Amino acid sequence: METQIKSKENFNPRIVAFLCNWCTYTGADLAGVARMKSSPSVRVIRTMCSGRVDPTFVLKAFKMGADGVMIGGCHIGDCHYSEGNFKTLRRVEFLKIMLKDFGIDPKRLRLEWISASEGDKYAHVTNEFEKELRELGPLVLQE
Amino acid sequence: MIKLTIDGKQLEVFEDTSILKAAEKAGIWIPTMCHCDYIEPYGVCRLCSVEVVKGKRSRIVTACNYPVREGLTVRTNSERVKWIRKIIMELMLSRWPNVPAVKEMAEQLGISKPRFESKEKDEAEDACILCGMCVNVCNDLVGKGVLGFSKMGIEREVVLPYNERSEECIACGACAYVCPTKHIKVKSLEYERGAIQDWSLASKTAIYVPTMQAVPRVPTIDEASCINKQTGGCKACQTYCEPGAINYDMKDEEIEVEVGQILITTGYQLMDLTKMPQFGYGRLDNVYSSLDFEHMLNSTGPTNGTIQCKDGSVPRAVGIIHCIGSRDENYHKYCSRVCCMYALKFAHLIKDRTTAEVYQFYIDMRAFGKGYEEFYKRLLDEGVNMIRGKVGEVTECRVDGEKPFLKVACEDTLIGKFREIPLDMVILCPAIESNADSSDLKKIFSISQSPDKFFLERHPKLDPMSTMTDGIFIAGCAQGPKDIPDSVAQASGAAAKILSLISVGEVAVDPIKAEIVEERCSGCRICNNLCPYGAISYIDEKKISFINDMLCKGCGTCVAACPSSVITGKGFTDAQIMAEIEGLLAI
Amino acid sequence: MAYRTYLMVCAGTGCVANNSMKIKEKLEDELLKRGIHNEVSVVTTGCNGFCAAGPLMVVQPDGVFYQLLKESDIPLLVEEHFIKGRPVKKLMYTPPKEKSSIPKMSDIPFFANQTLIALKNRGLIDPEKIDEYIARGGYEALAKVLTTMTSEEVIKEIKDSGLRGRGGGGFPTGIKWETCKRMEADTRYVICNADEGDPGAFMDRSIIESDPHAVLEGMCIGAFAIGASDGYIYIRNEYPIALQRLQVAIKQAREYGLLGKNIFGTDFSFDVRIVRGAGAFVCGESTALMASIEGKPGEPRAKYVHTVEKGLHDKPTCLNNVETWANVAQIITRGASWFSSIGTGDVSEDAWGGSKGTKVFSLSGKVNNTGLIEVPMGISLRQIIYDIGGGIKDGKKFKAVQTGGPSGGFIPESLLDLPVDYEELTRVGSMMGSGGMVVTDEDNCMVEMAKYFLSFTQAESCGKCIPCREGTKRMLDILEKITTGEGTEEDLVLLEELSYMVVDSSLCALGGSAPNPVLTTLKYFRDEYETHVRDKKCPAHCCKALIKYSIDPNICVEKGHGCGVCSKSCPDGAIIGESKQVHYIDLMKCGKCGICYDSCKFNAIYIE
């Protein structure tokens, strides 16, 4: 795989966001409709539920060159599928431990609860995540 | 059954029947003045005295409460009985000579002039004749015990406890209804209490007509306060209802209806004005909410549509304060949309019906609709005072020798001065807010709420009446504050959307489902417990798990969890998502 | 520690009001001073009964009776009797018109002619000491009942005894108990009616004050017989001493395990609560009393369904009067045949066939010996008034006796030999009632008397039903007219008619009996009414509107020499006259108070 030397100065982090169809994806939509400025680095993948996010997806994203991964779901208790986001919560906790073992800063994986009406929160969270990743610098994976 | 003889007539009646009832059955009239069918016989007028004969001895008993006994011989019209009735009527006539009920009864019994002269004579036509029916109705039937007797003997009188107005009284009017002399009158007291909502929205009796404009306009029973629902007694309304339209066996029931689509139009509630004590609502007289005032304006309302203060006087100046709780950082940030226009309507009606000065205290005048701005202009021509600025507080002022008035303190931002304006009446325009239980509804329908708690539409511009859940639609103030034309428009749109789906006849269901590749399933059953809908079951014979297509909602939780990766989410397969990731990160 | 002598000082309400507690203190002081306080003990007892002689004291064991004691008499009494052993004659009882005094209580006719059952312990025990009650055989009956008898046997014993309700109605107690027991119910109540409301009657109070345990024991036995575990004593709050003694008695009985759970170690449990009445006369009526206990207004209801079927809280309830309860233990101890041997008639076939045992009366009015007496049923009125009561005061002429409280009738002299029992009294238009007995003499106007008692019942009417509320008031109005000289012959007819109507159609016994004084006086003393109406005169000189005071000028000058005492004493300044001259009464000013009449030593003033 081609490795690029990424310098901190003109570094534009690549964020893969798995967003649940009912809440965060709609929230992102709302942010757009409301003309809120959100990070352009975010590349969105829609899943029906945050519970659909298989840990391998996250690992795959990091492997493919993502600098950060965000999972967005409904607030606890508000899940469209009753309890899918509980499963996500548990998986992410394990995943963070695993990422550490792989030498990836767990901060690069973010789990956020953003409801359909929280366009502003979506914008705020993505912007903040981008800023954080800028400080962390590009993800360099050891072969 | 018990056999007895009344005035020579043989008859057979049930046990525990009173002589009065038995006589009634036999078509024999016995006079009474303290008996009504709905209450336990009280036996105080003694007019129903009859002679009960046992062997050679006879005794006088009251027919209303003497239970029939086997072989009883009753004389309802013997000389002795007639003599007793005559003297009782004379006693009553001498005390209450002008009460129609007494006069009529006396006439029926053939008594014209009493031989007694009563020192306690009460010549009123509606004098209390101490029959006690009101007291018994209130105690036994209504169960409130508001009325009672005080003093003894000749001084006995029916009173409220301590002669004060009772908080217990539910103003059911039963006492006034049974009163044979119309001595008891039900008086509307709410006006004295200040807060108009008492007379309008709160139910005062157990059975009531919700509003005069209710459709259909029929009374409804409030289960919580209905005596019958609690004790099985009372049934006064049933007894009074001639067509027999009242049925206590009807119960609130949960009806399950299978539907394909749901339109939620649960509306709104007005903000509780007591949260903002600076405006004095519920505390100061003549401070009303817009809804209270609307009731006052109503021609079927408590004042028959006249605008008047609590003391009945016509106000000299009325202030209308906009944006109570709306456009307010502390309560609701949004604009309630309808207040400006109804406040202008109020101003117009006040000007129309009274000579009062009208002051509008507004932040911005939002006359945005068709013809609205023109109405605003018209109002300015009518001489309504417009004060741009938020009101700080409403206080009551008392000046010696004058009736108290209200004072509104505000900043007039147009002239840049602090002003205090004396008023006789203040109308507050409370914010429209989402119903208190809207969060429960949200959970039931799996829909979302915006931060202001109104239900969230699928798309604010392109799809304002759908929700994120297919088949659930919203319209009206449940979605956000709006006026009647807007609500009608949105509801019509939602109805059209629903109809369009119905006319198609079939609905395309999302194909997003999970599927198990049978051959590769190891039967570990990890997925079985994960599914919130119980769509995954384990087939014993095949030792594999199986997904019921109709139950599966396609969330994909099981897909992500399957250790053998044999569950695929249609439309969201692992491969598809992997490819998405690759594609996204290719650049 | 035994004493040689016990001084039983009466601490009944009458004697206490006459300073008997001071007498007791003085006695104790004096005994201490003389150093014989270890030999002579002072005991306070309940009412002795001879209230006219109070404050009084009985010296036991000799039985010497001292009366009308004053604090100043005490040093002499102690010195003479208890140190020197010479009873003091001048402090003893001397019958009217006789010279020698009677030293022994048992020889005094007032006591000698009485038979004590309900009042067995009066004056003999300290009512606040349960041990003294037990020492006199108390709670023996209860023990017998609980350990050897069944409830049926108890009821049979009471039935056989012929005991009837002493509260007024005279309902056979045994039958009441039996009916109550027969009713199917999970709970039954016994109630003691101590709401004694008759003016001048104080037998219930006296029984409770002198022997509270007798009532408790009776209730306990009754509760066992009918199967009740809760009892109430409804007592008026105006009886503070009785109330306090009851409280003490209940506390002691509980301590001794005679009230409460598992009495005498048996399965039977029973306790008593005191309910204090506010003093409404009508609350003596059983249904009104129960309504009052339930916390409702004390108003009667129709009793076509009896309280033994549906009483307190709609449960079968056995309500008896204090005196009835006080008889119960005696009957159990001494047997039904002993009890039924006293009195009139035969109750073996018909429970209403006779009046058995004794009855306590409070004898008051114009007799010499007023007080509380217990006499056997069947005794004649003459014996009561003349033998026990010692005849009419000041040698006046007897006119009538009213029995049974304010709603009792007046019995004239011609019926004085009437045996006192339920049926006879009712027959002549009066009643047994709770045992009030008011004697009137020639100075009493019967119209005035009727008016007085009717004004009481009229004021105490609860006002529920028309005949009682309106009827009694109209009757009173007519009587008022008659006594003020405005009555007519028609009024008499109307009054009589109205009286019969009120009796016939009133809701409860209060109204049903309230006209009795009017009816009996109309019956036996109609001539007095007629004199009032026709001649506008009051023969007894009672009705103020119908009399006028005059001064006989001859006596005034000749005997009194125009002394002027009358003129000075007249509150209205209505008597004019110079000293040593004839005095005249200005009738315009005269308030007819009669003070001048009493003040004239020469009887120059007379009533026309």
Image: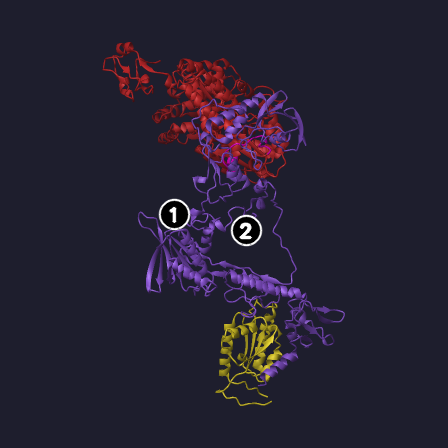
- Chain shown red: that is C
Q: Chain of mark 1?
A: B
Which amino acid type corresponds to the residue marked 1 in the rendered image? Answer: Ser
Q: Is residue C131 above or below residue B552?
A: above
Q: Chain of mark 2?
A: B
Spatial CA span between label 1 and label 2: 30 Å
Which amino acid type corresponds to the residue marked 2 in the rendered image? Answer: Ala
Residue C305 occupies quadrant: top right
In the displayed image of the protein, which residue is found farthest to the right? Answer: B541
Q: How many marks?
A: 2
Q: Is residue B312 or residue C62 the one in the foreground?
A: B312
Our reading of the magenta stretch's main secondary structure is loop
Give the mark nearest the N terminus, 1 or 2. Answer: 2
Disc 1, SS: loop
Residue C63 occupies quadrant: top left
Report the residue marked by disc 2: B214
**Discs 1, 2 touching: Cβ within 8 Å:** no
- Count residues near mark 1 (Cα–Cα under 10 Å), then give few for <14, some for 14-19, many for 20+: few
* Tint applied to chain B in the drawing: purple
Does A70 lie within the magenta span? no
Q: Which quadrant does the C terminus of chain C fall into?
A: top left
Disc 2, SS: loop
Q: Is residue C148 or residue B316 the one in the foreground?
A: B316
Specify start and end residues of the magenta stretch as a single range.
C291-309
Image location of residue B223, percent across then percent down = 57, 48
In the image, what residue occupies the spot 49% across and 13% down? C414
Image location of residue A139, percent across then percent down = 54, 85
Q: Quick check: can you spot residue C133?
A: no
Residue C144 occupies quadrant: top right
* Left or right: where C428 falls relative to B283: right
Image location of residue B4, percent across then percent down = 66, 27
